[in-house]
Amino acid sequence: MSLRPFFLWADNTAVSAAIRDSRVLFPIIETIHLFALTVLFGTVIVLNLRLMGVGLRKQSLGTVSRALAPLTFGSLAVMLLSGFALFLSEAMKCYENPPFFFKMTMLFFAIAFHWSVIRWLVRKNGTASRIVSVLAAAVSLTLWFSVGAGGRAIGFY
């Protein structure tokens, strides 16, 4: 099954045309996207470092997770919405761009890993073995940084 029809549709929407035809919309949306990405990475890094036992040791894992949750959810939502707008503006360019597909794959796995394994470890509130916690945090950080690296590579392809 080819994704080409979806990419063609996305490339021909009114929103994509408006973003492409504007001199300021793309840079504004991209700036918002990067700010949201920065906040998301910040929350992910803090939570994963706590999971590794590196920082905020006086705070329980659950407390840290609950404090970061609104920022994590909010920045992820903004990042996904702004990312979709950026995608619409250059859908056909993305269709022929391997780093775009790498980024989307890593994003899927990073979100799935975060909302399954990391949340499971948070619910255990530090009672999981240290090796499992450290390994899970390392995998999580690798996935999220792969998303960022893939996003950065899009412009070079």
Image (tube, rainbow, N blue to C red):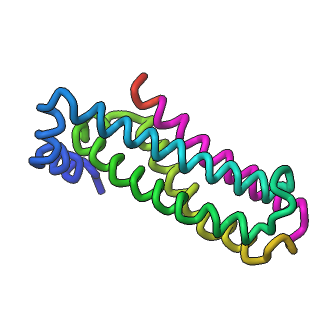
Give the answer, above or below, for where 88 lies relative to 97: below
Image-based side of 53 in relation to 108, left or right:
right
Q: Is residue 156 visible?
A: yes
Quarter of the rendering containing residue 65: bottom right
Give the answer, above or below, for where 96 lies relative to 136: above
* Nearer to us in this view, 135 or 70: 70
View extreme (right): residue: 130
Q: Position of residue 105 (x, y in %)?
A: 49, 50
Which region of the structure is painted magenta?
128-152
As for residue 111 lying within the magenta part, the answer is no
Give the answer, above or below, for where 72 lies relative to 102: below
Quarter of the rendering containing residue 97: top left
Q: Quadrant of the C terminus?
A: top left
Image-based side of 130 in relation to 106, left or right:
right
Q: Position of residue 60 (x, y in %)?
A: 80, 68
* Nearer to us in this view, 62 or 118: 62
Q: Residue at x 33, y 53 (%)?
A: 81
Q: Residue at x 61, y 41 (%)?
A: 145
As for residue 132 lying within the magenta part, the answer is yes
Q: Residue at x 85, y 50 (%)?
A: 54
* Nearer to us in this view, 33 or 14: 33
Q: Quadrant of the N terminus?
A: bottom left
Q: Residue at x 33, y 48 (%)?
A: 82
User: What predominant SS class does the magenta segment belong to?
Assistant: helix
Q: Is residue 113 visible?
A: no
